[in-house]
Image (tube, helix red, strand yellow):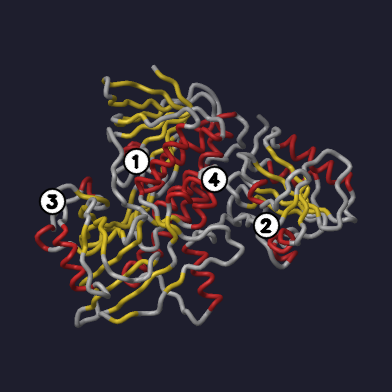
Amino acid sequence: MDEIDVLVVGAGPVGLTAAAELRRHGVDCRIIDRLAVPQHYAKAVGVQPRTMEVWDAMGLVGAALNEAVPMHGQLPFVDGRPGPRIELTMPPDIPYGFAALPQYTTERLLAEHLAGYGTRVERGTELLALDQEAEAGTGGADGPDGRVLAVLATPSGPREVRARYVIGCDGAHSLVRKAAGLRFEGDAFPEQYMLGDVEVDWDLPAGYGVRATHHDAEGRVDDLLVCIPLPGRKRYRVSMLVPDELARAGAQDGVAHGLESGAAPELRHIQAVLDRLSPQPTHASALRWSSTFRISHRLVDRYRAGRLFLAGDAAHIHPPTGAQGMNTGIQDAYNLAWKLALAVRGVGAAGLLDSYHAERHPVGAEVVGRTVRHSRTGVQADPGSPDILDAVLRREAQLLVGYPDSPLVEPEGDGGPAGHGHGPGSGERAPDSRGLARDLAHYPVRLFDLLRGPRHTLLFHLDAATPEEPVTTCAVAALSTAHGLLDVYAVLAPDAPAPLWRLPTARDTGGEFRSAYGARPGEAFLIRPDGYLAGRFHPPTPDRLATCLRRTFGTG
């Protein structure tokens, strides 16, 4: 019988992210998918700026930038009349913008990235059953001895695999979720939709999505057209309500969500909707693929059941408004992988894996609720209120996701926002900053360059008056508590001398780091592998740093 640390079920963007991150963190894993070949469908196409940051840390962003196209905004039309144009222009402190990329391209890039670690998707391999075996030793579901027995149907026949952990990235009809006995509560939208990948000959501005709605006499939406630009000349993924002749009843296992089998929409069906709702007369051509689909909104009650974990559509499904689904799932996997890596190494604190549910379940609940509210009206913001528009953009970009109530982060006190007035607080996203200088680099360095490793990062902000000895003592204590799985840097103010001891440094030549973080002389910032602030400390002490790190790291 094969033994494995982690079995990932499902090779969509979420499963591929989980497997790639596990491998980057040094964990042996296998990833299976029941499909013999990947689907060539442009299903999820919107890529959020936060996902681009995740891909930056993973080492994947260059390939994505080569393939994606910018999403500049949205052109809304209501009952034939144009509404206020929505511009998706990010503030200058955000390194990436909104992008569009067909899901099959996202999956190909992630699979190629995963193959670079020597791991390939085992295709045509289906999960049949799971059984969490009784623990053979101490430690419960986080201990080293328990296993999950997985029965697989492979191209060469049935096989059994024993895994320490299983991640269910197997979609809305997840067998892992069913095996875990978890509830998946919610409801379905009565409407049925159709998708198509087409080219159109209108002269609307490139890089803008189109959302056109029509209302009946009672003010309800009775016709809908949403077009998202794709790579290629005037190519869009279009979605619209299904005509009566294509409507069908029934839903697999009671969960009405996703693409459906049966008669696919033809070009004439798509053209009929364009004729009714397109803001300009246009002709559709070059239909690459099409399908009908349904939408539900559901949320699993727990993201973890013992050694079984859920991510992506296996845990949360909702309307595609704002392109939140795939991006939320990718960040589920990104949050979970580094924690599982520490558990596999045997250096994770008790309860570390429980933090996955504690952190990600509220995010899933918020996304489900928001996308349901926006499913009829789209993303709205007052264009005359820059502060509101900025907040809406950052929220849709998933840059406001945070874990301030996480059991892993330092409670706010003198080191939190109340003490310094601005900059990220505990559990918030660690922002980038530019203009850092390193001795041997004849070019400006970004803070994200320092955070790209798979370990925690400890930053000390030093000015000319910061004494060296306390910083050294803090760094040694933090490294010991983290079992050496910690990168330490001194971020120097423009007038600060280089430390006498051997510590990697970066000089904040333009003060952008100090401004972005609200950094005070001598302050320390502890940043997690997923790019969130575990705590900020002013002044840092060995005990405070060790206490914070022990929320994540056990005694080993």
- The secondary element bearing badge 4 is classed as helix
Q: Which mark is residue 263?
A: 3
Q: Which mark is residue 471?
A: none
Residue 58 rendering spot, x and y as whole percentages: 54, 42
- The quadrant holding residue 241 is bottom left
Q: Which mark is residue 355?
A: 4
Quadrant in which the C terminus appears: top right
Extreme residue toward the left, this view? 245
Please tell me which residue lies in front, 34 or 473. Answer: 34
Q: Earlier in the sequence, mark 2 or mark 3?
A: 3
The residue depicted at 69 percent of the width and 48 percent of the height is: 526
- Label 2 with label 3: CB-CB less than 8 Å: no
Nearer to us of marks 4 and 2 is 2
CA–CA distance in space, label 4 to label 3: 44 Å
| Residue at which label 2 appears | 434
Q: Is residue 284 above or below residue 459?
A: below
Label whose residue precedes the other's in the sequence (1 or 4) = 1
Lower position in the chain sequence, tag 4 or tag 2: 4
**Residue at 59% in and 37% down:** 350
Residue 362 image position (x, y, % from top left): 48, 56
Residue 170: which disc?
A: 1
Disc nearer the start of the sequence (2/1) = 1
Which of pointers 3 and 1 indicates the residue nearer the eye?
A: 3
Around disc 4, counting alpha carbons within 10 Å, would you say few (fewer than 14), some (14 to 19), or many (20 or more)? many
Mark 1 to mark 4 CA distance (whole Å): 22 Å
Dot 3 amino acid type? Ala
Closest to the camera, between mark 2 and mark 1, is 2
Q: CA distance from mark 3 to mark 1?
A: 24 Å
